[in-house]
C-alpha cells in the first residue's frame, strides 16, 4: 500500500517501477541488495571506530548477515511505499566497494513534503569531495523527481566536516536543538539546517 501522503500516486508509481541508481561523475548511489552484504559489513567493520562517535549505538547483531538481510528488505519496502530512500555510495571504478551511505529519511507529504538527510563516509575517503558530490545528486533527485519541498539535516556542533558539507550543499542554519538525538550513548545537541526547493510544484490530486 502506498503512503497516502504521497504527491500523486501516478508520479510515485512511475518512480518505483524502475530500479533506482543515481550516477555522478565518480559515484554510483543505489539501493543495496543481499549481494552487497559482504561489502556493507566490511564498510561498517572497517570504519567502526571512526563512525561510532557520530551514530546511535549499534546492537552486536548489526555486524551480521542476518541483520542486514532484514535491514535491506525494510529499506526496499520504505522505498516502494515512499517513506525513505536509503542508498549505498560506491565508486564507479570500484563498484564492489561500499564507501558510504546517504539517505532521505522519514519522507512526509501532506503539508510538509519534506525529508531528513543522513549520510556517512569511510575514513579513507574523506577530504575528496565525495559526500558533496553524492549530496548534490540526491538533492537533485529529491527536488526534481520526488518533488520534495524541504530537506532537513542536523549535525553535532563539533562535526566540522559535516558542517562544511552542508554549507557547500547550500543548507541554511536554523538553530540549535538541545539533547536532540541519542548518539554514541548520550543525548547530544545538534545544529539544525534545511534546504528548500525553489521550484516545488503543487502535486495533482
Image (spheres, rainbow, N blue to C red):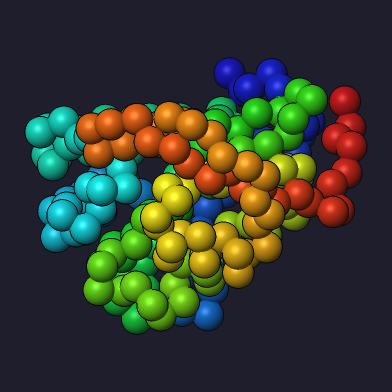
Which residue is at 76% across, 49% downward? Answer: 196
Give the x, y percent position of residue 71.
30, 34
Q: Is residue 187 above or below residue 90?
A: above
Which one is in front, 70 or 153? Answer: 153
Report if residue 85 is visible in the image: no
Counting labels gives 0
Q: Position of residue 158 (x, y in %)?
A: 39, 55
Residue at x-position 31% and y-position 43%: 55
Pick whichever, 108 or 165, lies toward us: 165
Q: Is residue 69 above or below residue 173?
A: above
Residue 43 falls left or right of residue 4 = left
In the displayed structure, would residue 170 be above or below residue 11? below
Quadrant in which the C terminus appears: top right
Give the residue drawn at x 71%, y 22%. 5
The image quadrant where one finds the N terminus is top right
Give the image location of residue 43, x and y in percent. 21, 58
Q: Hey, which quadrant is residue 58 in on the image?
A: top left
Give the side of residue 57 with respect to residue 16, left or right.
left
- Residue drawn at x 46%, y 77% is 129
| Residue 64 visible within the image | yes
Residue 41 place in picture, x, y as percent: 17, 51
Question: Is residue 12 shown left or right of residue 81?
Answer: right
Amino acid at each position: 500500500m502506498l503512503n497516502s501522503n504521497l504527491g500523486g500516486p501516478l508520479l510515485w508509481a512511475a518512480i518505483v517501477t524502475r530500479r533506482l541508481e543515481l550516477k555522478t561523475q565518480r559515484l554510483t548511489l543505489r539501493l543495496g541488495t543481499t549481494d552487497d552484504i559482504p561489502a556493507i559489513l566490511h564498510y561498517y567493520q572497517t570504519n567502526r571506530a571512526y563512525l561510532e562517535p557520530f551514530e546511535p549505538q549499534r546492537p552486536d547483531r548489526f555486524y551480521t548477515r542476518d541483520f542486514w538481510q532484514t535491514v535491506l528488505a525494510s529499506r526496499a519496502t520504505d522505498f516502494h511505499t515512499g517513506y525513505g530512500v536509503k542508498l549505498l555510495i560506491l565508486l564507479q571504478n570500484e563498484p564492489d566497494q561500499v564507501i558510504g551511505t546517504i539517505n532521505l529519511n522519514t519522507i512526509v507529504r501532506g503539508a510538509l513534503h519534506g525529508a531528513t538527510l543522513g549520510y556517512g563516509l569511510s575514513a579513507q575517503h574523506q577530504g575528496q569531495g565525495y559526500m558533496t558530490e553524492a549530496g548534490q545528486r540526491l538533492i537533485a533527485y529529491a527536488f526534481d523527481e520526488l518533488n520534495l519541498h524541504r530537506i532537513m539535516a542536523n549535525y553535532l556542533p563539533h562535526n566540522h566536516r559535516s558542517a562544511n558539507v552542508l554549507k557547500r550543499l547550500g543548507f541554511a542554519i536554523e538553530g540549535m536543538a538541545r539533547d536532540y538525538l541519542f548518539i554514541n550513548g548520550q543525548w547530544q545537541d545538534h545544529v539544525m539546517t534545511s534546504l528548500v526547493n525553489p521550484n516545488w510544484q503543487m502535486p495533482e490530486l
